[in-house]
Image (cartoon, rainbow, N blue to C red):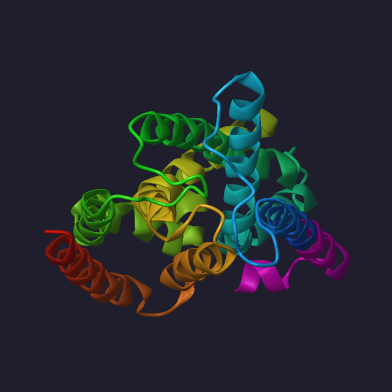
């Protein structure tokens, strides 16, 4: 895009390395945490968790780091376009906020989601619907989550949120706000659309395993491709049908 091409090479490299570095550190943390939860023979070291304050904080941190690692790659085009617009405004003598203010607003939305995800995990644990490795041990729960995620792929609210994520220039031009607070609010707005697009998909982590790195990577890749591919919205609906089918099969097996 023209706005990105107009960014100075130094700014472009700085933004990409910053986002890439944060993403890499997030994944390294997840790899280390997954390794700590298992031994070479695949047997879990984790017992049934006791949800005290320390464990709750550990789970919240896990979710927060996971969301950052999964979602930052898909927001990179939006961040670069924001930086391009900010750079152009600065050249025209206008006061603009640093790109970090926009990113911090975006991340804040996913931190809020991480809190709700942690509370959801706590509730599922109390209902004995999760194994110690944070995988659903209920055919009914797994089927329901897959079917719900598949149906959501076809809902108008999903499409509306996805269009905002797939059209970064349109979002910037229609939601632009000046100043650092304005940039933060823009990040919140874009994060809210991103959350509306992906929150049900994140629930599928309870199906494949919250600490299953391949499953996490698969969902993150799907989110990224859905936002950047020319026909990502169509492929998302096709994937929705596959989710519904898989959920139906699991429900049938569980009866």
Query: Going by the picture, which residue comes out furthest to the right?
Result: 10
Q: Does 33 sit left or right of 137 as displayed? A: right
- Which sits in the foreground, 33 or 22? 33
Q: Is residue 186 above or below residue 91?
A: above
Where residue 166 appears, as percent x and y from the top left, is 43, 64
- Which sits in the foreground, 180 or 53? 53
Name which residue lies at 59% across and 27% down: 56
Question: Is residue 15 within the magenta segment?
Answer: yes
Q: Quadrant of residue 46?
A: top right
Query: Going by the picture, which residue comes out furthest to the bottom?
Result: 230
Name which residue lies at 40% across and 44% down: 130
Where residue 2 appears, as percent x and y from the top left, is 63, 73
Q: Is residue 10 above or below residue 99?
A: below
Question: Is residue 76 within the magenta segment?
Answer: no
Q: Does 68 sit left or right of 218 as displayed? A: right
Q: Is residue 19 above or below residue 174?
A: below
Q: Quadrant of the N terminus?
A: bottom right
Q: Quadrant of the C terminus?
A: bottom left
Query: Going by the picture, which residue comes out furthest to the top?
Result: 53
Question: How many marks are shown on the rendered structure?
Answer: 0
- Which sits in the foreground, 158 or 214? 214
Magenta span: helix, strand or loop, mainly? helix
Where residue 157 appears, as percent x and y from the top left, is 25, 49
Where residue 218 appears, as percent x and y from the top left, is 49, 70
Q: Which residues are magenta?
A: 1-18
């Amino acid at each position: 895009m023209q706005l990105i091409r107009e960014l100075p090479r130094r700014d472009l490299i700085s933004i990409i390395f910053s986002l890439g570095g944060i993403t890499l550190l997030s994944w390294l943390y997840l790899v280390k945490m997954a390794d700590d939860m298992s031994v070479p023979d695949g047997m879990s070291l984790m017992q049934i968790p006791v949800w005290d304050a320390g464990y709750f904080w550990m789970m919240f941190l896990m979710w927060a780091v996971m969301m950052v690692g999964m979602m930052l790659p898909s927001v990179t085009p939006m961040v670069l376009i924001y930086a391009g617009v900010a750079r152009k405004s600065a050249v025209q003598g206008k006061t603009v906020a640093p790109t970090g203010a926009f990113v911090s607003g975006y991340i804040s939305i996913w931190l809020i989601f991480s809190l709700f995800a942690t509370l959801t995990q706590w509730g599922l644990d109390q209902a004995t619907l999760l194994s110690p490795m944070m995988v659903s041990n209920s055919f009914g729960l797994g089927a329901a989550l897959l079917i719900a995620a598949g149906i959501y792929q076809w809902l108008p609210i999903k499409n509306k949120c996805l269009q905002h994520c797939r059209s970064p220039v349109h979002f910037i031009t229609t939601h632009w706000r000046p100043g650092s607070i304005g940039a933060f609010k823009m990040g919140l707005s874009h994060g809210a659309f991103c959350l509306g697009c992906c929150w049900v998909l994140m629930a599928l982590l309870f199906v494949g395993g919250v600490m299953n790195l391949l499953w996490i990577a698969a969902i993150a890749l799907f989110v990224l491709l859905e936002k950047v591919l020319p026909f990502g919205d169509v492929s998302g609906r096709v994937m929705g049908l596959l989710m519904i089918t898989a959920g139906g099969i699991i429900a049938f097996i569980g009866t």
